[in-house]
Amino acid sequence: MYSKNNAALRPPMGWNSYDYYNTMVSEEDVKRNADFMAEHLRIYGWEYIVVDIQWADPAAGSLCPQVQYVPFTRLCTDEYSRQIPDPARFPSSAGGKGFAPLAEYCHKKGLKFGIHIMRGIPRQCCHDHSRIYGSDATADQIANPFSVCKWNGDMYGVDYTKKGAAEYYDSVFNLYAQWGVDFVKVDDICNTNFYKENPYSAEKEIEMIAAAIEKCGRPMVLSLSPGPAVIEKAWHMEKYANMWRITDDFWDDWRLLKNMFERCEVWQKHVGSGNWPDCDMIPMGDLGYGWNKTARKSNFTSDEELTMLTLWSIFRSPLILGTELPSLNKESLSRLQNEEVLALNASSHGACQVMRSESQAVWASQGDGCPARGTDVFVALFNLSEEDSEVSVNLREIPFINESGTYKVRDLWNRKDMFPVEGNTELSISLNKHGAALLKLSGK
Amino acid sequence: MYSKNNAALRPPMGWNSYDYYNTMVSEEDVKRNADFMAEHLRIYGWEYIVVDIQWADPAAGSLCPQVQYVPFTRLCTDEYSRQIPDPARFPSSAGGKGFAPLAEYCHKKGLKFGIHIMRGIPRQCCHDHSRIYGSDATADQIANPFSVCKWNGDMYGVDYTKKGAAEYYDSVFNLYAQWGVDFVKVDDICNTNFYKENPYSAEKEIEMIAAAIEKCGRPMVLSLSPGPAVIEKAWHMEKYANMWRITDDFWDDWRLLKNMFERCEVWQKHVGSGNWPDCDMIPMGDLGYGWNKTARKSNFTSDEELTMLTLWSIFRSPLILGTELPSLNKESLSRLQNEEVLALNASSHGACQVMRSESQAVWASQGDGCPARGTDVFVALFNLSEEDSEVSVNLREIPFINESGTYKVRDLWNRKDMFPVEGNTELSISLNKHGAALLKLSGK
Amino acid sequence: MYSKNNAALRPPMGWNSYDYYNTMVSEEDVKRNADFMAEHLRIYGWEYIVVDIQWADPAAGSLCPQVQYVPFTRLCTDEYSRQIPDPARFPSSAGGKGFAPLAEYCHKKGLKFGIHIMRGIPRQCCHDHSRIYGSDATADQIANPFSVCKWNGDMYGVDYTKKGAAEYYDSVFNLYAQWGVDFVKVDDICNTNFYKENPYSAEKEIEMIAAAIEKCGRPMVLSLSPGPAVIEKAWHMEKYANMWRITDDFWDDWRLLKNMFERCEVWQKHVGSGNWPDCDMIPMGDLGYGWNKTARKSNFTSDEELTMLTLWSIFRSPLILGTELPSLNKESLSRLQNEEVLALNASSHGACQVMRSESQAVWASQGDGCPARGTDVFVALFNLSEEDSEVSVNLREIPFINESGTYKVRDLWNRKDMFPVEGNTELSISLNKHGAALLKLSGK
Amino acid sequence: MYSKNNAALRPPMGWNSYDYYNTMVSEEDVKRNADFMAEHLRIYGWEYIVVDIQWADPAAGSLCPQVQYVPFTRLCTDEYSRQIPDPARFPSSAGGKGFAPLAEYCHKKGLKFGIHIMRGIPRQCCHDHSRIYGSDATADQIANPFSVCKWNGDMYGVDYTKKGAAEYYDSVFNLYAQWGVDFVKVDDICNTNFYKENPYSAEKEIEMIAAAIEKCGRPMVLSLSPGPAVIEKAWHMEKYANMWRITDDFWDDWRLLKNMFERCEVWQKHVGSGNWPDCDMIPMGDLGYGWNKTARKSNFTSDEELTMLTLWSIFRSPLILGTELPSLNKESLSRLQNEEVLALNASSHGACQVMRSESQAVWASQGDGCPARGTDVFVALFNLSEEDSEVSVNLREIPFINESGTYKVRDLWNRKDMFPVEGNTELSISLNKHGAALLKLSGK
């Protein structure tokens, strides 16, 4: 039987153009990052190449850095009210080929291809009364003139009660399937923040999109943005989507990173095959080039980067890199190539917060070991304080630990074995300010 | 010196098409009501003929009664992004004459002419990048794609920080001045209810409109809708507008009428020359034809109608009739011709609530009598309870009464003199359920 | 190692005095219900006898039915600011014995004994500057004069930052341990509804209480009220408590019962050993005697009762009967004795909502069968509509079903075997309005 | 006829102990300030001496500066649940004389005497079931256990529906009348900020207090705190009280002073005989001694002090000095002795904001001159910007100005005549950053 979960049996890993290119990524840029991924990261599991927002907008970025999205821009669309790539930035799309050539480029390198879209239908098509593929309805007849996004003026929401509404979304995803799209990040849909009293107001559009993906015949990861996702609606997201943002936009700011611990606390019970609460893109290396043609380095220290990668990994967030991949320094790159850590993200289970205070946090999860010899236990320790300090946890507080057992301890980031420990003792480790350690405990 | 107050030295009195015709009034309908007003009401002070919403929309009403406003309709506009009347419904407007012929029709009968507009600029013009008169800017450059109305999808708000924004509003009001417009009801501007945390978000558009009226050279009453107006912003409204709605839409429902007493309590200190807190249109006689081509009678009883007219009169609300004028019955019409009551609306002052409980209310105000002999005092008594009952007030509680004086009492609605009263006694009167009395006390 | 989970490895089952006796239950009443439980229900797993609110208040109920809680009543307390039972209603408590004799009465019958308390310390003790056991601090020094309950005026919250605060809670639970208390329902602590912006404001009091229970040496179920519990704080509740209310007070009203489906949807991932999101007491049979000395029958129909018991059972809510047990009719009683259903509540796992609409809901869970032959799958079907109708589900949508398998079907409420079904077919059943069915599917 | 307005025909002027003494003022302190007022300020109209909060609390200030109000302190009360002065701090009150001797001290010096009280009845009396004078009810029977203050734990609100409630307030004000109290500042009553959804929740207590004052036979100014007062309830305050706080506590902080311009804008229509929207105490000279036995100087610059005094004066706020009077420097004192400015506060009318922007504000009002020769016009100009600058206004924008007239201009603060101006010209003046000018324009 069809299950949307099959499109994301483990947390998706990949790259997204937004943190570096903002609205201005080009085909050449995408290929450069795809090349890098294929060469340096693919064998570790990194595979998605995702083109983020405004790929259909010829004016994208023209008002940066004052204005991010050009008001009343004229998006490239086909005759059926569907956006198509701007051929100036995506030359291979010319002649009606859409993203098919770029997707094929990725596929040939063993990668997968994804795109960003805004919920809804282009406003311009509604005012033009444009056609809908597979329906007699026109765009104005299926759009809701009061369903708008708070921060991007391109689209109107689609009213599911209208004839032609489902046909529109079906036609859009059919087009994407023809292009070879493997991943769709749908925006203004997870938290429709214009509508404070109903931030999950796009519920029915999620259902239409999920149905369209099922019908299109091509597996696609369905990723919902922006956050924070509404926890009361978790069941609905789990039924229809593969990943959803658990915070508002995440950037290289320690306060946001510290706050992510609280968000992961809230969402920890909702992680599982096909369902990946999403900590958002990982801002490493160079960032922000698309704002004004000048890149900056991530503000995260090496310790903060480690904390970020450790939390994302043990929580099993999707791992989507927000950077210009070739800009990564050697240390950062080697962290992304640590197969022992990535294995934890890919296949551990039961991840839970053991404790969290203002100054430290501890998480644990369980490996997929052979039941006969007992499974591995992963323990992540975080120093959330403003000073270097000792972080400790009594192993008895960790659900998966056998109090009377003895464990070998391995430091996964440093790839080295440490002292053995008893299951009923205090585990303590010195951590830099904002730093983290990720340990594997294996029963002897 | 120019003062916007001169356009409305006393509360405007007139007729508005909305309560009867909804979005569908035609030139013929307007003329029929103008004829009636000229013949039966003009000499009592009634003078404004106001064409309400959607006069530029050829599709207006086509989805009634299911949908009031046609989404993504194509409004009639000129080359400068300004709405013009739909020539099918307003044949005299053909050939670029706009409302000039209809305004002239009214003027010739000694009446004044008004129109309704939505705040902003037509969405369609923004997506079409249409021109602005007197500016190089185009519509897309002055509109705010996130400033929308909650209930009508025609317009975008205009961003006052943009070059061309003031020019747009100037051009619009210049056109109206050319047409001969005397009254403009601007909607989605007094309480921009889409924006719950900032219901006075259109503050700067009010200022642009006020400036445009001043510049256009023709006096125009500026009326702001919808309500409830935000009392904290009273000073701003008093500086820029002539009237503003103090409640949400008022209809023929006793609960709304009873609630108006609370609203008048709140706004009583803000009534004065050029500044008229507005209780909204008076729904009498036939109503609601424009929804589905079937009129209904107002739900108000004769007593409730009297309560409404009494409160509006003593509070000095604008008096704008919402009805098909020829449908008025004899009693209703004669009430609108009661010059003793209308004088109170036109020229009393100091109106204040004396008391209000769940079951009764008393208001008082002072006439414009000769100071030498003492001025008249008006007292309105209301039975808000669900039973016929006695309503009373001790005259000493009324600010304008001389405790040691003696007063002649006249019943203004019934046009007859009553018993004399002493200034320190209880005045008591039997009133039907939901009924009212309006008395004039004159010092002997 | 100590774990609070051990006090409630499966959902607690028992009886609570509130729904029938309100604030007025007496020792005799408690014994009567304990006797009934011991005789008719104990062997099916029912064991807790819980004395609800106001057992320390000699004036309890004296203002009913106008006022539920007597303002500024003088609670019975010991010299250490701790409440003790009113000896007039609980004669065996006289002479400082507290609830020990009544607890022993229950224990001798193989039952367990519980009590209700309000969060905090008696207001009267604070104003009297009463002593705290084990501390030099006095009541006024540990109480927060601004931490009050919205609906009961007996207590002030305890400020955890104050010396003596933890000692107070320790002394209270030590006393309860001496009495032999097995279950404590703490009120005004799960949703402190006076504080709308911080409904989990008693977080630190929960921690003090959990610590006091651990220290007292006697296992006690910690039950938090009232609801709705704040889902964002689930981790904290799971760390410190055993059960917490997921709705406001539940009564015999279909709208509340229908709403519980939504609440169970929200909380389904948080059910597990030691952690029992609580659907509140089960109002069956006679109710409401304590309001004004007159009982009434539950408003639930037989079908609604079945729906309630089915949802509570498959969701694995605690099962706490709110009724006068001897008043139960034969049908109701037999339902409480259905060991096949109760086994599902006690030991199934993975319960999840399969679907929910306005008209029907389906839940499923998995039994604890032998892995070798495949485990049983439980399916609950609910008719939420206002008419008798067919409720159906495609078995492929149920997570635990093997699509290619064949299943024996047993109707648990009616204790009879039905037709076999294939794992990939539609299962359909006729249900009365508001009715339910609970089926066990066993692989053949 | 009795009118509460007679107690405050002009804005009250006086001194209040709070800003300097916090909760710790003593009889000696009060006398010292009364002496100073009698000698230096009385002839200018300053007359009220007001003892602020906690005069009945023997422990007042004992936890300062950590805690302002001692939780569960034991207030001094008489046998009828009424607070009486702490005899340690107010020795003359011993022997049941209350504040009578201190009031007499003031009266003998030609001053008036006032006190602060919290709304309600002492919590301790409710828990003690204390008696109420003139009623069989006891304190517990009239208090509302859920009506509490957000920041002071002394009192419970009084439930007006209860027998004995009105008698309690009557007895309290009878006692004050016996003492010779002329002014009562009632706290936690104007904005009951614990109740965010109903900040005017003490409406009925205001009515009981107003009735008690009327019944007690002694005129008393009724002052309501804290603010911000709810503008929607202005009518009610005007009916029952004499002054009410239009902001939260005002202190010597420019941001608060700048914000007062907005508050005065909102309340300007509600100023009139007996009704004085209150800008709060004037923090000048030494402040804050009562926190920790160390005074500090006001943070206001000389210019800011002038701005404050100018705004309070033209708006006609009550003028209540918050300071240790003998600490005033020569300049400040001379400002308080400027009879030309004080006359404006005492008897001008029609004060209104002419304009306000981020950088400047202009107010105007009209004097009480002889109508035959035209009345004086007062104009206040304020530099709200962060730089010295020119502040200007076109005189035609000022309501009371005759455009074709010529005016003599007098600078009231500097007591000197300036240039004459025409009524249709721009008036411009150089002002220091945060400074002000107050001008009188007299028709020639």
Image (spheres, coloured by chain):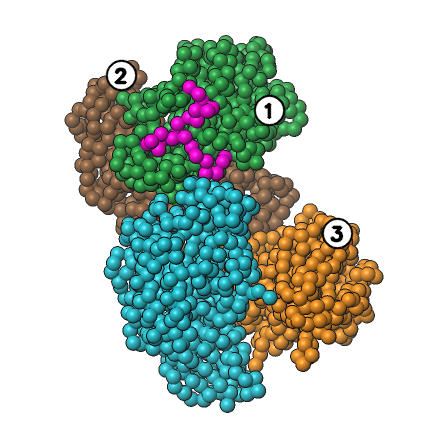
Chain colours: A brown, B orange, C green, D cyan
As drawn, D356 above or below D197: below
Whole-number angstrom distance, CA of label 2 to CA of label 1 = 60 Å
Which residue is labeled 2 in the image?
A: A373
Q: Across the whole image, how many numbered discs are drawn on residues?
A: 3
**Dot 1: element:** loop
Say if residue C383 shows up in the picture.
no
Give me the residue at 30% from left, 63% from top.
D28
Judge whether residue C70 is colored magenta: yes
Q: Which residues are magenta?
A: C69-92
Along the line of sight, the residue nearer the viewer: C371 or B361: B361
Name the amino acid type tagged 2. Arg
Indicate the secondary structure of the residue bearing disc 2: helix
Q: Residue at x 64, y 24 (%)?
A: C433
For disc 2, the chain is A
Residue at numbered disc 1? C295
Labelled disc at residue B388: 3
Where in the figure is residue C215, as x and y percent of width and height? Answer: 29, 26
Magenta part, dominant SS: loop
Question: x, y percentage for residue D260?
Answer: 42, 65
Q: Secondary structure at mark 3?
A: loop
Q: Residue at x 34, y 25 (%)?
A: C175
Examine the rendering and report whether any part of residue D351 can be seen.
yes
Graded by Cα atoms within 10 Å as few (under 14), some (14 to 19) or many (20 or more), the crowding at tag 2 reads few
Do pointers 2 and 3 mark residues of a single chain?
Answer: no
Residues behind callouts 2 and 1 on a single chain: no
